Amino acid sequence: DWARAAKISGARFTVYRGIGAKLERALISFMLEVTGGLPAEGDTVTLYNLSARGLLSSVNSSSTAIQTVSATLSEGKATGSNGSFLFRVEKNGAYYRFYNASFGYLSTEGTKALYTATASESCDFTVEEFNGGYKLLSREGKELQALDRKVAPKSEEKDRDTLTFHFFPCAND
């Protein structure tokens, strides 16, 4: 729907409707299912968000919010636009932890997603299948979402893709 796309974004974007939208979504889901599976303890992965079409990366110095960088997927691996941000997967009982050598553990504090130097319960996430990928839920039951890199109570209505993550190895690794 070129006319609607022009109204929404200006130029060079498309809006798919009906069977076109279903086909695009099916192809994306198939590709991500084949390549972005659940990581094992000790794996080194990138965290790719479907809505942002990017990877979780460094911290915004002015707000401490976690940023995303655009990424491309090829042959089951991710490449970030300014390098890739790698996480080592750890397990704490039934929970997953994601550690980055430069910034520390992916963590939640209130409604913010951030990094912390030491592991604690705020670094614990359950990972459940969702929307063709995975949803990360904090121990407190808040969902990690990527567009504004926040965590939010489960009850809030959100775009499903902002909550959908995939785990890919890094193409530069």
Image (tube, rainbow, N blue to C red):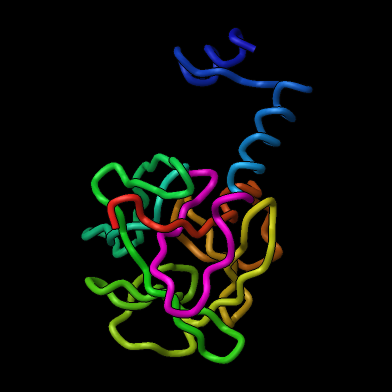
Quadrant holding the C terminus: bottom left
Q: Tell me which residue sits at (65%, 34%) in the image.
A: 27
Q: Is residue 30 magenta?
A: no
In-front residue for pair 149/73: 73
In the rendering, at what x and y percent does residue 160 appear?
65, 49
Q: Is residue 35 magenta?
A: yes
In the rendering, at what x and y percent does residue 155 appear?
71, 64
Q: Tell me which residue sits at (74%, 30%) in the image.
A: 22
Q: Tell me which residue sits at (69%, 63%) in the image.
A: 129
Question: Is residue 76 shown left or right of residue 130?
Answer: left
Report the number of numbered marks. Answer: 0
Where 18 sits versus 38, above or below?
A: above
Query: Residue lying farthest right?
Result: 19
Q: Tell me which residue sits at (55%, 55%) in the image.
A: 36
In the rendering, at what x and y percent does residue 113 appear?
43, 68
Q: Quadrant of residue 56?
A: bottom left
Question: Is residue 97 shown left or right of residue 5?
Answer: left
Which residues, given as a range, are shown in magenta? 33-52
Q: Quadrant of residue 119?
A: bottom left
Query: Residue lying farthest top?
Result: 3
In-front residue for pair 32/8: 32
Quadrant holding the N terminus: top right
In the rendering, at what x and y percent does residue 73 appear?
44, 42
Where 85 sits versus 80, above or below?
A: below
Where 18 sits versus 86, above or below?
A: above
In-front residue for pair 63/166: 166
